[in-house]
Amino acid sequence: MKDAGFIFGSYFVTLGAILVFAFVTLRRAKESSQSVDEKDKTWL
Amino acid sequence: MSQVLQRTSATGTRATKVIGALAILVMVWVVVSGLILTPQDVVQGESVRIMYVHVPSAWIAYLAFIFTAVASASWLISKKHSMGFDRFAGASAEVGVMFMAITLITGSLWGRLTWGEFWQWDPRLTTTAFLFVTYVGYLAVRRLEGSAEQRARRSAVVAMLAVLEIPLVHFSVVLWRSLHQGATVLNPNGDVKMDDLMLFTLFSGVVAFTLVFVWLVLHRQRTMLLVDIANRQGLDAAIAARKTEGSVR
């Protein structure tokens, strides 16, 4: 495929950004949840 | 069940798991179809493959910023000033900024292939960059010192003003002479001149990114709630300690 570097690069950036955002969000959630009571986690 | 979910993710539920699984499935289809199955464009050639991630990311960023404005307006209007609106606005803006960054980067890669340059000070590109910077500013305003109420009020006002830029970005290709192509799908005539599989892949991208948006916002706003509760507990503990200190004297 011509110009493969740019095309694969755009998919890599897209998926990479989403995965990093998801990972950071889940890690922050885990850290923050340790000091919060179960009854305050209304979604559970 | 709730204990099992908590072990795997502090903010996850059965619904987020289903949404996450669907997002992965549709995203895999978009990557396979966008990179392998769809034909190359008559004019753009292979570079059209970038459009399957570039266009949906731009649309979802717009959507995220509109949701931020609606939630902010709801916070301002509602009598109770529910902090849930504020958290949703903040979470939506964060995810929107991420999608806007993806739009700018993938757009500049496409521009390098099509125009021979990563960046041009073209009306669409300039207004998009301005929109991105505005929402980075919005996120900075959310981190200013002050109570949760102050944060919500300040950021709600900024969000209501910032959303006015979206029509400017969208119609910049019509209002000014622009290198950027006009709307292919959302054109005013309504006649979409695209191959069926290309159009289906583009809309699959919109579905995949929408699912990702919902998943991320749900987790992010729940994380914000956890942080707000932890901060409130910390403040309550500090006040109680101070009162005890005062009564001892």
Image (spheres, rainbow, N blue to C red):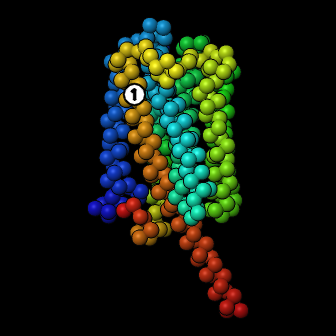
Residue at x 56% of width, y 47% of height? B70
Does the rendering let one see residue B87? Answer: no
Q: Position of residue B134 (x, y in %)?
A: 67, 39
Rendered location of residue B17, percent (x, y): 33, 49
Residue at the (60%, 51%) spot, across then down: B73
* Front position in the image: B13 or B7: B13
B83 relative to A24, above or below = below
Q: Quadrant of the C terminus of chain B?
A: bottom right
Q: Quadrant of residue A40?
A: bottom left
Height in image: A42 above or below B247? above
Amino acid under disc 1:
Phe
**In the image as oriented, which residue stretches furthest toward the front?**
B189
Disc 1: which chain?
Answer: B
Q: Element type at marker 1?
A: helix
Whether residue B155 is visible, yes or no, is yes
Q: Is residue B47 left or right of residue A44?
A: right
Local crowd size for mark 1, using a 10 Å CA cut-off: few (<14), some (14–19), many (≥20)? some
Q: What residue does disc 1 label? A: B203
